[in-house]
Amino acid sequence: EDKVVQSPLSLVVHEGDTVTLNCSYEVTNFRSLLWYKQEKKAPTFLFMLTSSGIEKKSGRLSSILDKKELFSILNITATQTGDSAVYLCAVRTNSGANNLFFGTGTRLTVIP
Amino acid sequence: DAGITQSPRHKVTETGTPVTLRCHQTENHRYMYWYRQDPGHGLRLIHYSYGVKDTDKGEVSDGYSVSRSKTEDFLLTLESATSSQTSVYFCASTGAGALNTEAFFGQGTRLTVV
């Protein structure tokens, strides 16, 4: 059975802190791993990772994939209150219509 | 952002009644998906579609059916709503190159079955 596990489940930090969110997976026919940010509405896309060791970066956010150890991390530096959200990790496989399997998410709260 | 809208945005219905949720996309995306999101479970796939009139079951399909008569519309029907189907429902779509593109999500429908 395909499985995506995120940790921690929730995290509270102060503005300016750096956080690392984890996503591990066990799936058949892995194609890519995606990160989304969800703020009380539709998930919005952050990154898609297909190759090991290649960092994707957007402003203060970055992510990397390790296909040997089957995990990915999402880093956020100099956190701001606007980073408060649920961060979702999803794995795309070859099955179905290239379906996405989601983890339960990490709820990040950034306090001033 | 991709043009993908869901209707209604909120609905309260009684146990045993049929309910249809609509997803409409203007991106000519080939693949469409229905998810439900519940605390502690994340997003779980209900049904998906490869194209017009081509659908299949996801991991939590019991009690749900779908139809796709046009590329732009994907309907989710609860034949006889139950309280366990109280949830937030998200529709998503991806283009023909689904392997290499992200999925775009609608704003969600909050369904309460009383």
Image (spheres, coloured by chain):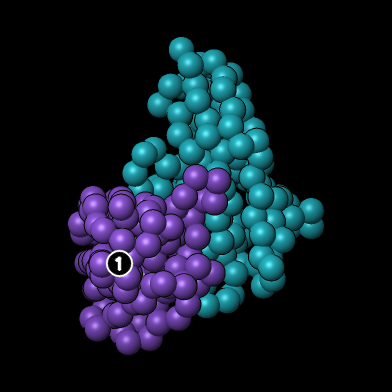
Chain colours: A cyan, B purple
Toward the bottom, the furthest residue is: B53
Q: Please indicate whether residue B84 sits to the left or right of residue A107 in the image.
A: left
Q: Please indicate whether residue B50 sits to the left or right of residue B112 in the image.
A: right
Q: Compared with residue A10, is residue A102 higher up or lower down, i.e. above or below?
A: below
The answer to which of B14 and A53 lies nearer the viewer is B14
Count of marks, rendered view: 1
Q: Compared with residue B5, is residue A59 higher up or lower down, i.e. above or below?
A: above
Where residue B52 appears, as percent x and y from the top left, is 31, 84
Q: Compared with residue A38, is residue B25 higher up or lower down, i.e. above or below?
A: below
Q: Amino acid at mark 1?
A: Gly
Please name the residue shown 48% across and 38% down the image.
A86
Where residue B1 appears, as percent x and y from the top left, is 29, 52
The answer to which of B6 and A23 lies nearer the viewer is B6
Please name the residue shown 57% across and 65% down the image.
A92
Where residue B91 appears, as percent x and y from the top left, is 35, 62
Toward the right, the furthest residue is: A68
Q: Please indicate whether residue B32 sits to the left or right of residue B58 in the image.
A: left
Q: Quadrant of residue A93?
A: bottom right
**Where does label 1 land, which residue?**
B16
